[in-house]
């Protein structure tokens, strides 16, 4: 069998090494969850650069899929709803990912389609020149039963109870994160609701094909 493909991330630390190390700690804490990124290796490439190696997911991001499947039809401004089966699968998998994170003592803070990756079992070959599959509406009946959605990008994640240093992307923020970001509340702390408000927005964004 062929080895699993890997994703390789280089991070310039420059005074933020502790944040990269925290992301690595989170990746290790949720490593056993099938709906979060699986870390393979990490370390220092140089005094100013750290690296993280994770499993690579071949279906691209949920954001890219939504732009293909749910975006306005060419030449119109009419927005299409995402297929209900897709919406239900995304909600289930992201809820399970957040359950894993909360059980490990962390909140994600920045749940959005661009941070959700698609893993496809027994995928068709990726065409030359592409880094992931381009899934079309015609592919969904075949591929949807083999899809799994993976919550990634833990760069803004915090331990439960820690002060929120960044509320994430405005369109997908939880209320307390939005207050912190707008300086209306200076003492907000991270809690599971800091993540779980975002999945409640994800189905809405899928239904209206809005992108943050």
Image: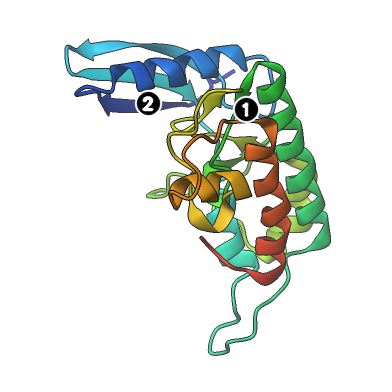
Q: Position of residue 60 (x, y in %)?
A: 53, 46
- Residue 91 vs 137, above or below: the answer is above
Q: Which residue is labeled 1 in the image? A: 36
**Element type at marker 2?**
strand
Q: Which residue is labeled 2 in the image? A: 8
Q: Quadrant of residue 102?
A: top right
Residue sitting at x 54%, y 12%? 28
From where the camera sits, is residue 173 visible?
yes
In space, the residues marked 2 and 1 are separated at their CA atoms by 16 Å
**Element type at marker 1?**
loop
At label 2, counting other C-alpha atoms closer than 10 Å, the crowd grade (few under 14, some 14-19, many 20 or more) is some
Residue sitting at x 54%, y 44%? 177
Residue sitting at x 57%, y 26%? 37
Mark before the other along the chain sequence, 2 or 1: 2
Name the image quarter holding the N terminus. top right
Q: Position of residue 14 (x, y in %)?
A: 19, 24
At label 1, counting other C-alpha atoms closer than 10 Å, the crowd grade (few under 14, some 14-19, many 20 or more) is many
Query: Depth check: 55 or 209 in front?
Result: 209
Q: Position of residue 107 (x, y in %)?
A: 61, 29
């Amino acid at each position: 069998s062929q080895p699993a493909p890997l994703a390789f991330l280089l991070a310039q630390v420059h005074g933020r090494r502790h944040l990269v190390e925290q992301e690595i700690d989170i990746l290790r804490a949720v490593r056993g969850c099938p709906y979060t990124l699986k870390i393979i290796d990490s370390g220092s490439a140089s005094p100013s650069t750290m690296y993280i190696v994770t499993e690579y997911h071949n279906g691209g991001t949920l954001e890219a899929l939504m732009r293909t499947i749910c975006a306005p039809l060419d030449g119109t401004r009419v927005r299409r709803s995402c297929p209900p089966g897709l919406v239900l699968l995304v909600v289930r998998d992201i809820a399970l990912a957040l359950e894993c994170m909360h059980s490990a003592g962390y909140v994600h803070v920045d749940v959005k389609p661009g941070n959700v990756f698609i893993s496809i079992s027994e995928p068709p070959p990726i065409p030359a020149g592409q880094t992931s599959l381009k899934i079309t509406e015609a592919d969904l009946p075949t591929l949807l039963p083999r899809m799994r959605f993976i919550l990634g990008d833990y760069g803004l994640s915090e331990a439960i109870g820690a002060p929120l240093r960044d509320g994430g992307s405005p369109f997908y923020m939880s209320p307390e994160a939005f207050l912190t970001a707008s300086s209306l509340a200076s003492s907000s702390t991270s809690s599971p609701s800091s993540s779980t408000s975002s999945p409640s927005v994800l189905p809405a964004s899928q239904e209206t094909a809005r992108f943050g």
